[in-house]
Image: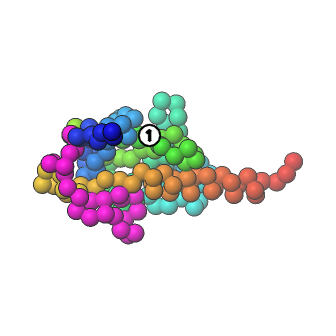
Protein backbone atom coordinates (compact mmCIF):
# COMPACT_ATOMS: atom_id res chain seq x y z
CA UNK A 1 0.00 0.00 0.00
CA UNK A 2 1.34 3.40 -1.02
CA UNK A 3 1.64 5.91 1.82
CA UNK A 4 1.45 9.63 1.20
CA UNK A 5 3.32 12.13 3.29
CA UNK A 6 1.32 14.05 5.86
CA UNK A 7 3.51 17.10 5.25
CA UNK A 8 6.50 18.28 3.26
CA UNK A 9 9.40 19.88 5.11
CA UNK A 10 9.76 23.16 3.21
CA UNK A 11 11.29 26.61 3.18
CA UNK A 12 9.46 29.87 2.56
CA UNK A 13 11.88 32.09 0.68
CA UNK A 14 11.20 35.82 0.33
CA UNK A 15 11.58 37.43 -3.08
CA UNK A 16 10.83 41.02 -4.04
CA UNK A 17 7.07 41.28 -3.49
CA UNK A 18 6.60 37.51 -3.53
CA UNK A 19 7.27 34.38 -1.49
CA UNK A 20 8.42 31.08 -2.91
CA UNK A 21 7.91 27.70 -1.26
CA UNK A 22 10.51 25.00 -1.87
CA UNK A 23 10.85 21.55 -0.36
CA UNK A 24 13.97 21.30 1.83
CA UNK A 25 15.35 18.60 -0.47
CA UNK A 26 15.45 21.06 -3.39
CA UNK A 27 17.70 23.53 -1.55
CA UNK A 28 21.40 22.70 -1.66
CA UNK A 29 22.49 25.72 0.38
CA UNK A 30 21.70 29.35 1.15
CA UNK A 31 24.76 31.58 0.95
CA UNK A 32 25.56 35.26 1.35
CA UNK A 33 25.00 37.49 -1.64
CA UNK A 34 27.87 38.17 -4.00
CA UNK A 35 27.78 39.93 -7.34
CA UNK A 36 27.54 37.40 -10.17
CA UNK A 37 30.27 36.87 -12.75
CA UNK A 38 29.60 37.33 -16.45
CA UNK A 39 27.93 34.63 -18.47
CA UNK A 40 30.05 32.45 -20.77
CA UNK A 41 30.60 34.16 -24.13
CA UNK A 42 28.66 31.40 -25.93
CA UNK A 43 25.56 32.35 -23.93
CA UNK A 44 25.99 36.06 -23.21
CA UNK A 45 24.66 37.51 -26.48
CA UNK A 46 21.43 35.54 -26.51
CA UNK A 47 20.83 35.28 -22.76
CA UNK A 48 17.28 35.98 -21.59
CA UNK A 49 16.71 38.85 -19.19
CA UNK A 50 16.08 36.48 -16.28
CA UNK A 51 19.60 35.02 -16.50
CA UNK A 52 21.75 37.33 -14.34
CA UNK A 53 25.16 35.69 -14.59
CA UNK A 54 27.17 32.94 -12.95
CA UNK A 55 28.28 32.46 -9.36
CA UNK A 56 31.03 30.25 -8.00
CA UNK A 57 29.76 27.83 -5.39
CA UNK A 58 32.02 25.15 -3.96
CA UNK A 59 34.25 25.44 -7.02
CA UNK A 60 31.36 25.00 -9.47
CA UNK A 61 29.97 27.61 -11.89
CA UNK A 62 26.24 27.96 -11.19
CA UNK A 63 23.77 30.02 -13.27
CA UNK A 64 22.05 32.78 -11.29
CA UNK A 65 18.47 33.47 -12.34
CA UNK A 66 15.96 36.12 -11.34
CA UNK A 67 12.77 34.27 -10.44
CA UNK A 68 10.98 37.63 -10.28
CA UNK A 69 11.82 38.42 -13.92
CA UNK A 70 11.13 34.85 -15.03
CA UNK A 71 7.67 35.05 -13.43
CA UNK A 72 6.90 38.36 -15.16
CA UNK A 73 7.99 40.83 -12.46
CA UNK A 74 10.83 43.29 -12.10
CA UNK A 75 14.41 42.43 -11.22
CA UNK A 76 15.08 43.00 -7.53
CA UNK A 77 17.99 45.00 -6.23
CA UNK A 78 20.36 43.37 -3.77
CA UNK A 79 20.77 44.78 -0.26
CA UNK A 80 22.32 43.78 3.06
CA UNK A 81 19.69 41.07 3.71
CA UNK A 82 19.98 39.52 0.23
CA UNK A 83 21.03 35.90 -0.02
CA UNK A 84 21.52 33.40 -2.79
CA UNK A 85 19.62 30.12 -2.75
CA UNK A 86 21.41 27.29 -4.55
CA UNK A 87 18.97 24.69 -5.87
CA UNK A 88 19.58 21.07 -6.88
CA UNK A 89 18.81 20.32 -10.54
CA UNK A 90 16.88 17.15 -11.28
CA UNK A 91 17.08 16.96 -15.10
CA UNK A 92 20.15 15.20 -16.44
CA UNK A 93 20.36 17.26 -19.64
CA UNK A 94 20.17 20.70 -18.07
CA UNK A 95 23.88 21.40 -18.49
CA UNK A 96 24.34 22.19 -14.80
CA UNK A 97 23.85 20.31 -11.55
CA UNK A 98 22.59 23.43 -9.74
CA UNK A 99 21.05 26.81 -10.39
CA UNK A 100 20.68 29.71 -7.99
CA UNK A 101 18.45 32.72 -7.39
CA UNK A 102 18.64 35.85 -5.26
CA UNK A 103 16.41 36.06 -2.21
CA UNK A 104 15.45 39.11 -0.20
CA UNK A 105 15.95 37.73 3.28
CA UNK A 106 16.44 34.62 5.30
CA UNK A 107 14.05 31.74 4.58
CA UNK A 108 11.79 30.32 7.24
CA UNK A 109 11.18 26.63 7.79
CA UNK A 110 7.69 25.22 7.42
CA UNK A 111 5.84 21.95 7.45
CA UNK A 112 3.65 22.34 4.37
CA UNK A 113 0.41 20.40 4.60
CA UNK A 114 -3.21 20.66 3.50
CA UNK A 115 -4.20 22.52 6.67
CA UNK A 116 -1.65 25.32 6.24
CA UNK A 117 -1.63 25.62 2.46
CA UNK A 118 -4.22 25.61 -0.30
CA UNK A 119 -3.85 26.01 -4.06
CA UNK A 120 -5.31 29.20 -5.51
CA UNK A 121 -4.77 28.31 -9.15
CA UNK A 122 -2.48 26.42 -11.46
CA UNK A 123 0.05 28.48 -13.38
CA UNK A 124 -0.76 29.94 -16.74
CA UNK A 125 1.42 30.47 -19.80
CA UNK A 126 2.12 34.09 -18.81
CA UNK A 127 4.12 33.06 -15.74
CA UNK A 128 6.92 30.74 -16.84
CA UNK A 129 8.57 28.88 -14.02
CA UNK A 130 5.44 28.83 -11.84
CA UNK A 131 3.77 25.52 -10.99
CA UNK A 132 0.97 27.10 -8.96
CA UNK A 133 -0.06 29.94 -6.70
CA UNK A 134 -0.99 29.03 -3.15
CA UNK A 135 -2.19 30.58 0.09
CA UNK A 136 0.03 29.67 2.98
CA UNK A 137 -1.24 30.52 6.43
CA UNK A 138 -3.20 33.43 4.95
CA UNK A 139 -0.42 34.76 2.67
CA UNK A 140 0.01 34.34 -1.08
CA UNK A 141 3.02 32.37 -2.30
CA UNK A 142 4.33 30.62 -5.40
CA UNK A 143 5.52 27.08 -5.94
CA UNK A 144 8.07 27.09 -8.77
CA UNK A 145 7.97 24.66 -11.68
CA UNK A 146 11.51 23.27 -11.49
CA UNK A 147 11.05 21.09 -14.57
CA UNK A 148 10.21 24.13 -16.66
CA UNK A 149 12.99 26.28 -15.14
CA UNK A 150 15.54 23.53 -15.78
CA UNK A 151 14.31 23.14 -19.38
CA UNK A 152 14.63 26.91 -19.87
CA UNK A 153 18.21 26.74 -18.56
CA UNK A 154 18.93 23.78 -20.83
CA UNK A 155 17.60 25.75 -23.81
CA UNK A 156 20.01 28.58 -23.03
CA UNK A 157 23.12 26.60 -22.16
CA UNK A 158 22.83 23.40 -24.17
CA UNK A 159 21.51 24.95 -27.39
CA UNK A 160 24.12 27.71 -27.40
CA UNK A 161 27.01 25.31 -26.79
CA UNK A 162 25.72 23.10 -29.64
CA UNK A 163 25.50 26.09 -31.99
CA UNK A 164 29.02 27.16 -31.13
CA UNK A 165 30.41 23.67 -31.76
CA UNK A 166 28.74 23.67 -35.19
CA UNK A 167 30.16 27.12 -35.99
CA UNK A 168 33.76 26.38 -34.97
CA UNK A 169 36.16 26.05 -37.87
CA UNK A 170 37.51 22.56 -38.42
CA UNK A 171 41.22 22.06 -37.80
**In the displayed structure image, the side of residue 81 where residue 91 appears, left or right:** right
Q: Residue at x 39, y 54 (%)?
A: 145
Residue 119 visible, this orientation: yes
Q: Residue at x 28, y 50 (%)?
A: 20
Residue 105 visible, this orientation: no
Q: Position of residue 95 (x, y in %)?
A: 57, 46
Above or below for 131 versus 13: below
Does the magenta-highlighted stretch encompass residue 113? yes
Q: Residue at x 57, y 61 (%)?
A: 46
Q: How is the image coloured?
A: rainbow
Q: Position of residue 126 (x, y in %)?
A: 38, 69
Callout count:
1
Give the residue number, with chain letter if any, for mark 1: 88
Q: Work out which residue is located at the far top of the displayed protein and give it.
A: 58
The image quarter containing residue 4 is top left
**In the displayed structure image, the side of residue 152 where residue 2 appears, left or right:** left
Does the magenta-highlighted stretch encompass residue 125? yes
Q: Work out which residue is located at the far front of the displayed protein and give it.
A: 1
Q: Position of residue 33 (x, y in %)?
A: 36, 40
Which quarter of the rendering shows the N terminus? top left
**SS for callout 1:** strand
**In the displayed structure image, the side of residue 133 where residue 91 appears, left or right:** right
Q: Work out which residue is located at the far left of the displayed protein and give it.
A: 138
Above or below for 156 versus 56: below
**In the displayed structure image, the side of residue 68 where residue 150 appears, left or right:** right
Q: Residue at x 48, y 30 (%)?
A: 58
Q: Position of residue 164 (x, y in %)?
A: 70, 55
Q: Specify start and end residues of the magenta stretch as a single range.
A: 111-133
Amino acid sequence: MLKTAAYVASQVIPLEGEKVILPNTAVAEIIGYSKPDSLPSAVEKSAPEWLQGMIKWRGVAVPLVSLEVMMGGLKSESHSRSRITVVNVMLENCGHSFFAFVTQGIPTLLRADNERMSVIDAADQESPGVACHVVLEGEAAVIPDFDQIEKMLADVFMNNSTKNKKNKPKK
